[in-house]
């Protein structure tokens, strides 16, 4: 029987995990697949790790986990899960059940088509989400698809079912600055999207604030488009052109009519405008330079502190000492 690797990044998900695991186990008889759970504990501060330890002990053949030494972010969790996955099919899911497990049945049926390498999901509604967040999310997808070289579907989720071949291709992209939605599209392969309506979290609260999402969207734009650099160049060229024209006008006016006004307010305004343009351009360039700086360090995406094998060895060691 083929194996399905289920990657679940976790950050403070102690309340959601029992509901998630129960829902997945109920789904299991409906799929002709062996399940391989890979939970990635991304530096949780609650009892997530304690629950994963119990789950791995109770289900030694199917449940595996990785626990990071600190919070490295969702992208690191996804990458770690993909590296550890050994299944013929691989799916990425959230533990809060906002990714409906029952969709996996339809996804599995669709991916049996030899022409399809990935079955993704996309939200067609954002019910229950703050209106401001929904507005900026829609604007982000419109912007990145206009200025980027890689199409990212509006409402696309990380929740998708992929073939082994596609996952191996993704793992060849070893960059430090990762934006998975873009990487899933960049590697190519035939992807079919299943629409579904937004689902509320089953328990707990999200760790994604508006500003975290905003910063994440900026990273996505920088990772998959050099248009901001081109914009900075165009703004700089226009500023130079306007300055030259203004200089010619001022010289001609002075020669013909003298200088009837002191020009102090206008000079200050121009200086502030040009300074602002320079700082904006430097900020855009600095963002790209910062990404290059992080790439050249060659630091690991994550550091593993514990997994189910290390925990079992540690626990057995303690039992041996007690005996």
Image: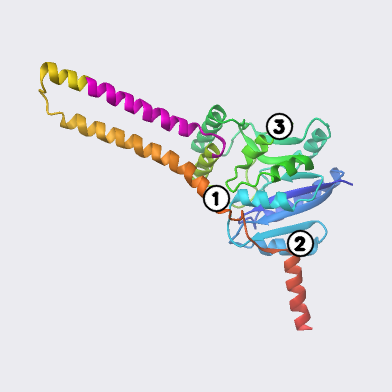
Cα gap from disc 3 to disc 1, whole angstroms: 36 Å
Label 3 close to label 2 by CB (< 8 Å): no
Magenta residues, dominant SS class: helix
Cα gap from disc 2 to disc 1, whole angstroms: 37 Å
- Image: magenta residue range: 223-248
Q: Along the horizontal axis of the image, is 63 left or right of 217?
A: right
| Residue 23 can be seen, yes or no | yes
Q: Residue at x 77, y 49 (%)?
A: 5
Locate residue 27, reporting x and y percent.
80, 46
Say which of marks 2 and 1 sits in front. 1
| Residue 95 can be seen, yes or no | no
Under circle 3, the secondary element is: strand
**Quadrant (top left, top right, bottom left, bottom right) of the C terminus:** bottom right
Say which of marks 3 and 1 sits in front. 1
Residue 56, numbered label = 2
Locate residue 232, reporting x and y percent.
42, 32
Q: Earlier in the sequence, mark 3 or mark 2?
A: 2
- Residue highlighted by disc 1: 296
Asked if residue 169 lies in the magenta stretch, the reply is no
Label 1: how many residues lie within 10 Å, few (<14), some (14-19) or many (20+)? Answer: few
Under circle 2, the secondary element is: helix
Q: Residue at x 25, y 34 (%)?
A: 271
The single residue placed furthest to the top in the displayed view is: 256
Label 2 close to label 1 by CB (< 8 Å): no
The single residue placed furthest to the right in the displayed view is: 1
- Residue highlighted by disc 3: 193
Label 2: how many residues lie within 10 Å, few (<14), some (14-19) or many (20+)? Answer: many
């Amino acid at each position: 029987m083929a194996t399905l690797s289920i990657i679940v990044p976790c950050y403070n998900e102690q309340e959601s995990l029992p509901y998630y695991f129960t829902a997945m186990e109920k789904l299991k008889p409906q799929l002709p697949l062996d399940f391989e759970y890979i939970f990635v504990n991304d530096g949780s501060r609650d009892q997530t790790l304690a629950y994963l330890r119990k789950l791995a002990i109770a289900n030694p053949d199917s449940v595996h986990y990785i626990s990071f030494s600190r919070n490295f972010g969702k992208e690191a969790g996804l990458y770690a899960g993909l590296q550890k996955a050994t299944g013929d099919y691989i799916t990425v899911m959230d533990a809060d059940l906002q990714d409906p497990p029952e969709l996996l049945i339809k996804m599995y049926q669709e991916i049996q088509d030899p022409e399809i390498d990935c079955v993704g999901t996309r939200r067609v509604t954002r019910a229950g989400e703050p209106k401001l967040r929904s507005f900026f999310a829609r604007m982000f997808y419109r912007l990145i698809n206009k200025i980027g070289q890689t199409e990212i579907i509006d409402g696309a989720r990380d929740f998708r079912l992929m073939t082994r071949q596609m996952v191996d291709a993704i793992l060849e992209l070893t960059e430090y600055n990762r934006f998975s939605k873009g990487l899933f599209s960049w590697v190519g392969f035939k992807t079919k999207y299943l629409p579904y309506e937004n689902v509320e979290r089953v328990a707990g609260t999200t760790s994604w604030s508006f500003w975290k999402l905003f910063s994440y969207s900026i990273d996505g734009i920088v990772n998959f488009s050099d248009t901001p650099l081109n914009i900075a160049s165009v703004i700089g060229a226009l500023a130079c052109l306007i300055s030259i024209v203004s200089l010619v006008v001022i010289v001609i006016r002075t020669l013909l009519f003298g200088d009837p006004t002191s020009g102090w307010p206008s000079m200050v305004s121009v200086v502030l405008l040009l300074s602002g343009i320079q700082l904006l351009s430097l900020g855009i360039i600095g963002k790209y330079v910062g990404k290059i700086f992080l790439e050249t360090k060659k630091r690991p995406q994550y550091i593993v502190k514990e997994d189910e094998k290390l925990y079992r060895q540690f626990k057995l060691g303690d039992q041996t000492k007690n005996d």
